[in-house]
Every structure is written in structure tokens, then in C-alpha cells.
């Protein structure tokens, strides 16, 4: 079973947002969003900020370990 970022997945679900829609809104590649969901890699700080802004939450909420 793959690890997933539960807060990212839940926030997307609450907003009715797909990975593709989030990528478009955040201005990032769809694969970047997929990697963030599956926790393959931590996103770059500017990417994490764009995703958080698109979802209306903080980076710290989605990635508590990021400074």
C-alpha cells in the first residue's frame, strides 16, 4: 500500500478538487501534485506554497515538517 498525504487528500476531497484541477489552479505540473499526494518527494517550498494557496490552507497544515 502506498503512503499518501492524508491532509492533502482530505483537503482536495473537501474542495471537490482533482489532482489535475489542483495542478492548474496552483500553476504546477500534474505529476508534481501526484508526487505530493503519494509522498514520493517533499515539494520545493515554492511549490508547496502554491499548492497550499490553491487549497486555502497553510503549508504547515499540509506538510507539518516543512519550515
Image (cartoon, rainbow, N blue to C red):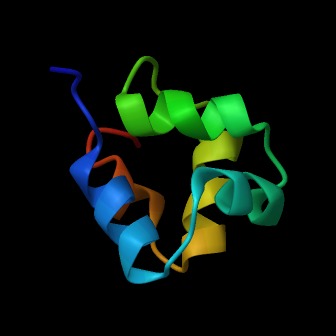
Foreground pick, 60 / 54: 54
The quadrant where residue 54 appears:
bottom right
Residue drawn at (50%, 78%) of the image? 16
Residue drawn at (79%, 44%) of the image? 28
Residue drawn at (75%, 59%) of the image? 26
Left or right of 2 on screen, residue 60: right
Q: Position of residue 35 (x, y in %)?
A: 52, 27
Q: Position of residue 23 (x, y in %)?
A: 73, 52
The quadrant where residue 29 appears:
top right
Q: Position of residue 38 (x, y in %)?
A: 38, 30
Foreground pick, 19 / 39: 19
- Image mark count: 0
Q: Which residue reaches farthest left?
A: 1
Instruction: Work out which quarter of the rendered image holds the C terminus and state it.
Output: top left
Left or right of 31 on screen, residue 25: right
Q: Using the image, determine if residue 3 lies above or below residue 56.
A: above
Instruction: Work out which quarter of the rendered image holds the N terminus and state it.
Output: top left
Q: Position of residue 12 (x, y in %)?
A: 45, 67
Amino acid at each position: 500500500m502506498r503512503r499518501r498525504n492524508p491532509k492533502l487528500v482530505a483537503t482536495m476531497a473537501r474542495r471537490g478538487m482533482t489532482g489535475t484541477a489542483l495542478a492548474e489552479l496552483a500553476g504546477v505540473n500534474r505529476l508534481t501534485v501526484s508526487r505530493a499526494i503519494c509522498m514520493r518527494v517533499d515539494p520545493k517550498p515554492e511549490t508547496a506554497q502554491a499548492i497550499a494557496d490553491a487549497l486555502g490552507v497553510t503549508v504547515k497544515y499540509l506538510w507539518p515538517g516543512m519550515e
